[in-house]
Amino acid sequence: MTVVAAALAGADGRVLLQQRAPGRAMAGLWEFPGGKVDEGEPPEAALARELEEELGIAVDPADLAPACFASAPLGERHMILLLYLCRRWQGEPRPLDASALRWELPAAMRGLPMPPADAPLIELLEALLERAG
C-alpha cells in the first residue's frame, strides 16, 4: 500500500502535524497529513487531493518536492510512506479530518507520539530543512 504525506513547512521552519481522530486506527497519534494513493493515481495528485479533503487547502502538485520515504508493516499489509516537502499552498489549514493541528519544529516532534512510519522521517526532514535554510 502506498501512502503519501506532506511536510507543510512555514517560513519559521515549523511543520504542520495533525492528530488522528478518535475511533480511527492509531487515534491520538500525531502525523504528517496525507493518505492513500488510489490505483492509477499519481502520488502528487493523490497528496493534493488528500490535503484538500483533510485540511481544506489547495496545493499545486508541482509545489510538492519529494523529501524521503519510510517502509513499515501495517497489520497484514506493508506500507510505503512517501513524504513530500511543501512550502506553498492556498488557504488556512483546518482540521477537517483530525482532532487537532499543531505547528512544530522537527526537533520538537521527537517527543510526540507518532505512527511507526512517521517517526523515522523526523531526522531526515530536519536535515533536509536545515540544508534548505
Image: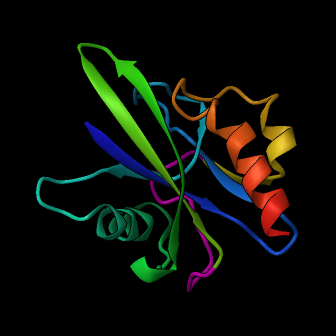
Q: Residue at x 42, y 23 (%)?
A: 72
Q: Which residue is outermost to the top?
A: 76
Residue 6 is left or right of residue 23, and the answer is right
Please check the rendered image and state whether residue 120 is part of the magenta-colored stretch, yes or no.
Answer: no
In the rendered structure, does residue 92 fall within the stretch colored magenta?
yes
Quarter of the figure with the C terminus: bottom right
Q: Is residue 35 left or right of residue 109?
A: left
Taking depth in this image into account, of 107 and 71 the one nearest to the observer is 71
Could you tell me residue 98's position as x and y percent?
52, 48
Viewer-proximal residue among 122 and 33: 122
Residue occupying the point 74% across, 38% down: 123
Picture quarter with the N terminus: top left
Of residues 5 and 92, the one nearer the viewer is 5
Going 78% across and 68% down the picture, which residue do you hit?
132
Q: Position of residue 14 (x, y in %)?
A: 81, 60
* Residue 128, x across and y down, in percent: 73, 55
State the image quarter where residue 67 is shown. bottom right
Figure colour scheme: rainbow
Most extreme residue toward the left, as rendered?
40
**Relative to 80, is 8 above or below?**
below
**Hey, which quadrant is residue 52 in on the image?**
bottom left
Q: Do we see residue 60 in this rendering?
A: no
Give the left or right position of residue 67, taking residue 71 as reference.
right
At x 41%, y 28%, the residue is 23
Instruction: Specify start and end residues of the magenta stretch as a single range.
Output: 88-99
| Prevailing secondary structure class for the magenta stretch in the rendered image | loop
